[in-house]
Image (tube, rainbow, N blue to C red):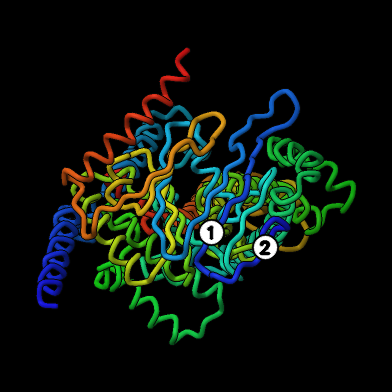
Amino acid sequence: MASDTIAEARADAEISGLDALEIAGRQKTTTRAATLWASTWPKLAALAIAIAVWQVVVWAEIWPPYSLPGPGPVWQELVRQASGPQLWDGLVTTLRRAALGYVFSVGVGLLLGLAVARFRVLRAAIGSMITALQTMPSIAWFPLAILLFELSEKAIFFVVVLGAAPSIANGVISGVDYVPPLLQRAGRNLGARGFNLYRYVIAPAALPAIVAGLKQGWAFSWRSLMAGELIVVGISQTSLGAQLTYARELADAPWLLSTMIVILVVGLGVDAAFGAADRAIRRRWGVLDQAGQ
Amino acid sequence: MTSTTTTPRSATGSVALHGVTKVYGQGEHAVLALDGVSLDVAPGEFVCLVGASGCGKSTLLNLVAGLDKVSGGRIELGDGVNPGLMFQESALFPWLTVEGNVDVPLKLRRLPRAQRRERVAELLRTVHLAEFGRKRPHQLSGGMRQRVALARTLALDTPVLLMDEPFGALDAMTRDILHDELERIWAERKLTVLFVTHNVREAARLADRIILLSSRPGRIIYSTRVDVPRPRRIDSPEIASIAADVTDRLRTEVGRHGQ
C-alpha cells in the first residue's frame, strides 16, 4: 500500500536523522602527529632536566669524577661499547635469559590463574598464597636458589619465574573475577556455554587485566633477572649484570653507568610495548574516549 | 540448557508458566521472589509485565530464559526453543564491532562464513544500522546500541523474545521511535514477546495484554487486554486511559506496602 510505504520512508528518515544527531561531535579532530608530539615532548623535557641535574651534581664535585663521571664521558663510553662486541654479547645473554624465564612464567601464570579462577577449592587453598608470593622480594629467594641449583643459569631461572608468575596469575584471576555478570548472562543466552563462554566472553573481557598482569610480571622478572645476574657472576657469560659487577670491581665508572643506561633503556622499551598494547585495548573498548584523551 | 521442568510443546512460539515459584536463599533468610505465577502466552502475542520494585519481573524472565532454575512449578516452551533475552543495558561486547557482536550467536551455531555475513547484513538492515557495522559499541548512542542488541538477539532465530526494560535508559524521543521499530519487527517476524517494564504507558503502547505483578512476593494481580488498533501512538487518549487504569491499580498495590 502506498500510505504504508510513505509511513515507512518517514520512519527511516526519522531514525537516520536521530542517529546522525546523536553521533555528531563524537569524532576526534586531532591528527596523529599532534597526538604523538603531545605525548613525546614532556618526556624529552624530563630527560633533558634529568641530564642537566646530573651535570650540575658532577660540577658541584660532591664526588670525585672517577666515582661519578658526567654525562659526556658516559656517553662516549656508551658509544665505544656499542661499537664493540662485549655489550652486544651481554645484551643477548641477558635478553635470552629474560625471554626464557618470562615465557615460562607466562605459561605457568596463565594456567595457574585460570585454574584458581575456575575452581573454588583451589582458590581457597592457594589464592592468598599467590598474593603472598608476590610480596616476597625476589632477591630473598636467591640464597635458597643457590643452595638448590648452585651458581647456575637454573638458579636465575628459578627466581625469575617465582618473581613473575604470581603477578601474571593474579592478573588472570582478577580479570576473570571482574568480568561483568551482565556480559556473562548475555553470552550464555546467545548460546555460549562451557568452553565457549570462556572463548567468546570471559577471555576477551578479562584481557585488559591480563595484559596488566603480564606487564607487572615483566617488571618483576626483569628486576629478578638483574638481581640474579649481580649475584650469580662468573658462570662464563658476560651478561649485563655481570658487566655491572666487573665495572665496579675495576672502578670503571663510565662503563658502569653506560651499562646501567642500557638496562634502563631495555626496561623502558619493553614497558612502552606493553603500554602500547594496553592503550590499543582501551581504545578498542572505548575507555580512552571517555577519559577525554 | 534443558531443565527437567521444561517440557516440549507443539506450538513453537508459545510460553506457558504453571504455578512458577522462585525462592532465593535458604532457611530463615529465604526470600520468596515469585509465588505461583501461571501465565499462558500465545504464539505471536505481545505481553507486557508491569510491576513496582521487587515484583520479580527480571527473575521471571531469567527463569523463562533458562538462566536460572524454578523452585516450584514448571515452564513450557516450544520444542527446542531458546528464548532471546535483552536487558536495560545493551550488554554488547565492547571488544567487538557492531558486526562482530551480531555475528556471535551465528558463530556459536556454527553457520558457514558466507551465510553469516549475509545474515549479519540483513539483521543490521532490519534495525537500520547497515552503515554502522564497523563501528564499536562505544561509538554509538544508547538507542543505537539497543538496536544492535536487538539485532544480535534476532540472530538467534528464536520465536520468543524476552525484554527486561530494554528502553528504560533512553530519552523519550528515542524510546518512541524504538517502540515503532520493535512493533514492526515483532509483526514482521511473528515473534512472541514478553516485555518487562515499570513504565505503564510504554506497556499500553506496546502490549496485546498487560499483566500486573504484586511486589514481595510477585503474584499476578491483574490482567487486561489492550484492544487499541495498531499502529498506536503513546500520546493517544485511548492509550492514556488504559495507562491510567493500570497506574491506579499499581498505586493501590504499592500503597499496601506502606503499612
Q: Residue at left 49%, top 69%? A: B158
Among numbered discs 1 and 2, the one appearing first in the sequence: 2
The image quadrant that residue A85 belongs to is: bottom right
Secondary structure at badge 1 equals strand
Amino acid at the residue labelled 1: Val
Crowdedness of circle 2 by 10 Å Cα count: few (<14), some, many (20+)? Answer: some
State which quarter of the image contains the N terminus of chain B: bottom right
Q: Is residue B69 left or right of residue B226?
A: right
Q: Residue at left 36%, top 42%? A: A51
Q: Is residue A127 left or right of residue B16?
A: right
Label for residue B130? none
Amino acid at the residue labelled 2: Thr
Position of B24 relative to B83 (above/below): above
Residue B249 picture location, percent across and down: 37, 30
Q: Residue at left 49%, top 64%? A: A82
Q: Is residue A179 visible?
A: no
State the CA–CA distance, disc 1 to disc 2. 11 Å
Q: Is residue A272 visible?
A: yes
Check disc 1 and report the residue beneath it.
B15
Position of B115 relative to A69 (above/below): below
Q: Residue at left 69%, top 46%? A: A166
Residue A100 picture location, percent across and down: 69, 64
Secondary structure at badge 2 equals loop
The image quadrant that residue A59 belongs to is: top left
Crowdedness of circle 1 by 10 Å Cα count: few (<14), some, many (20+)? Answer: many
Label for residue B7? 2
Residue A134 picture location, percent across and down: 69, 40
- Pick whichever, A266 or A59, lies toward us: A266
